[in-house]
Image: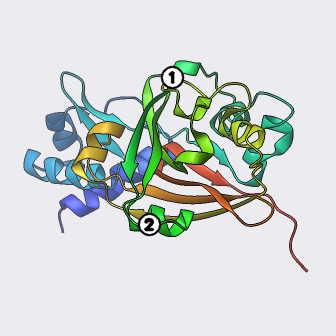
Amino acid sequence: MGTGYRELAAILRDAIQKGDYAPDSTLPKQDELAAEHGVNVNTVRKAIGALEAEGLVTPIRRRGTVVRARPPMKRLGTERYAKSKWKYGDVVAFVADREASGREWNATDQTQTVTRVEADREVADALDIPIGEPVYERARLVKDAGQPTHTLASYYRTEDVEGTRLVDPTPGPAGRGGGFLVLTLQGLEPDTITENFYARMPTPTEVEQLELPAGEPVMVLQRRTATADGRVVEFARGVHAASRFSWSYTFKIPD
């Protein structure tokens, strides 16, 4: 029985995973692969299409089929929010991830747009306010070495952040210690964080924003930040390119 496109895809997948084709390298041309494996070019094309749908390779104009780099950035769990980082230092959450991953960062890695918007149902439920009430939306696009990694939009009650750095659209964190320190100085010190995650396929806008290749899903974050008395002072929604992060959690096992 001859080699079909599924069998060829399995051969190429195994070669990629073993490192025979290194990250950011280009696969041989389709006619070369056809000759090497004794199949026609159409079979090669379908096999590569299957690998592209899996997110293993990306067709790049004038380069060919490129093996996707998979050096995911470590996204810390509870440690990324440690008060020792933002309250007594100047390390905000995304910077903590960069440092843990051995990556450099610049303030311009985070762009942002600050807008007054009407709270949708999800924001209203989180902040315990009526639907349609004005809130501040602080929307960020974060990059690593020029490559978009995720978007994050935080929502705040207007009275909590009016006149603070959290409504300043200057690129980068909201000053030393970031948004959590700003909230602390407003008498709203973050004490408890609840994060929920789920995966889905991206919208066309997200594909464009995050420069996603075909077949790559996104990880969606929903975060509620509350004070010690349980008042939610920030609700955030983030969309992360799935292959650009590994999610890392270290915690004491509860009794």
User: At numbered mark 1, what does the secondary structure look like: helix, strand or loop?
Assistant: loop
In whole angstroms, how far apart are the C-alphas of marks 2 and 1?
A: 26 Å
Most foreground residue, 106 or 125: 125
Q: Quadrant of residue 98?
A: top right
| Relative vertical location of residue 226 with respect to residue 71 in this rendering, above or below | below
Q: Nearer the viewer, residue 37 or 59?
A: 59
Percent from the top left, x then y, of residue 196? Answer: 57, 66
Is disc 2 placed on a helix, strand or loop?
helix
As displayed, is residue 3 above or below residue 187?
below
Q: Residue 100, percent across and down?
A: 73, 36
Q: How is the image coloured?
A: rainbow
Residue 23 can be seen in this image? no
Taking the image as shown, residue 15 lies to the left or right of residue 177, namely left
Q: Label for residue 122?
A: 2
The residue lying at 86 percent from left, 39 percent from top is 84
Q: Amino acid at mark 2?
A: Glu
Residue at image mark 1 = 171
Left or right: 131 in relation to 103: left
Look at 18% across and 69% down and name the residue there.
Answer: 1
Residue 183 % position (x, y): 70, 42
For the residues carrying marks 2 and 1, which lies nearer the camera in this image? 2
Q: How many other residues sit within 10 Å of disc 2, few (<14), some (14-19) or many (≥20)?
A: few
Q: Residue at x 17, y 48 (%)?
A: 44
**Residue 97 screen position, x and y as percent:** 67, 38
Tell me, yes or no, if residue 189 can be seen here: yes
Question: At label 1, which amino acid type do we have?
Answer: Pro
